[in-house]
Image: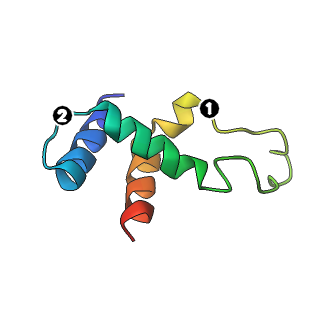
Amino acid sequence: MRRSLKTAREVCRAAYGSERITPKFWADYFETLAEDDFIAGRTPRGKGHENWKADFEYVTRAEVIAKAFERAVA
């Protein structure tokens, strides 16, 4: 979790000019995730993972936060 907070602060600094993690960050973040077909569950899962769904633990991983931010600013 500590690494996730560090990543979220870095995203906030880059996107909003402050390391403070605000409700705006979370709203924008979850909006970005909702647009992702994989995370939102709109794409088929691979063999053996047919019932997998993104949960809170998954979407708060540092690498998922970083990837969503990269996609949002691309």
Residue drawn at (53%, 29%) of the image: 57
Work out whether residue 32 or residue 41 is closer to the camera in this orientation and state it: 32
48 on left or right of 74: right
User: In the rendered view, would you say 20 is above or below 70?
Assistant: above
- Residue 6 found in image quarter: top left
Write down the residue under mark 2: 20
Q: In what quadrant of the picture does the C terminus appear?
A: bottom left
Q: Amino acid at mark 1?
A: Asp
Residue situated furthest bottom in the rendering: 74
- Pick whichever of labels 2 and 1 is earlier in the sequence: 2
Tally the marks: 2
User: In the rendered view, would you say 12 is above or below 2?
Assistant: below
Alpha carbon separation for disc pair 2 and 1: 24 Å
The x, y position of residue 34, in whole percent, is 59, 48
Marks 2 and 1 in Cβ contact (< 8 Å): no
Residue drawn at (85%, 46%) of the image: 48
Residue drawn at (39%, 36%) of the image: 26
Write down the residue under mark 1: 55
